Amino acid sequence: MKFRSVPAIITLLAAFVSSVVMISRRYSLFDFLLVLVTVLVVFYIAGLFLRFILNVVFKEQEKDKDDADEDGTVTESEADEKEEKKSKDRKK
């Protein structure tokens, strides 16, 4: 869910770059459209693949983090938060 817009961003960026290059090289309209549609399809598929990979990697990281929390291990940020709470309590 975090990476829902990745395929659209990659596709639009590729379409923009290819359009600028084709305009500067003065492609004919038919060739321009043919190349643009091909670029859109290829980079959309590449974006879907990248989104899938990112979702898998981050899901594994979240799972590892959740497993560590259930095991009772304390991460550095949690340890820092506990120390801050103790120091605030001492000041009161």
Image: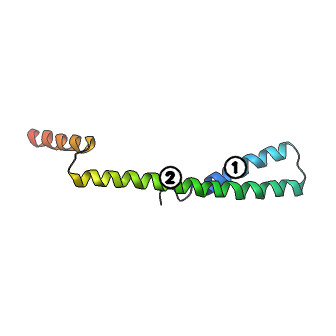
How many numbered discs, if any? 2
Query: Is 13 located above or below residue 45 in the figure?
Result: above
- Of residues 40 and 24, the one nearer the viewer is 40
Q: Report the residue marked by disc 2.
A: 54
Amino acid at pointer 2: Leu
- Is residue 34 left or right of 69 when viewed as pictured? right
Percent position (x, y) of residue 82?
Answer: 18, 44
User: Disc 1 designates what residue?
Assistant: 14
Nearest the camera: 32 or 38? 38
* x then y, percent, for residue 57: 45, 51
Image spot of residue 61 (x, y percent): 39, 50
**Circle 1 Cα neighbour tier, 10 Å, few/some/many (<14 / 14–19 / ≥20):** some
Q: Which residue is pictured at 34% across the width and 51% down the height?
A: 64
- Residue 34: give x, y in percent of width and height: 83, 57
Q: Which mark is residue 31?
A: none
Give me the residue at 87% from left, 54% from top.
31
First-in-chain label (2 vs 1): 1
**Type of amino acid at the residue the image marks with label 1:** Ala
Q: CA distance from mark 2 to mark 1?
A: 19 Å
Instruction: Kindly identify the residue that appears in the image at 53 percent across and 57 percent down.
Output: 52
Q: What is the secondary structure assignment of the residue under circle 2?
A: helix
Label 2 with label 1: CB-CB less than 8 Å: no
Residue at x 62% of width, y 57% of height: 8
For residue 7, side relative to residue 89 (left or right): right
Quadrant position of the C terminus in the picture: top left
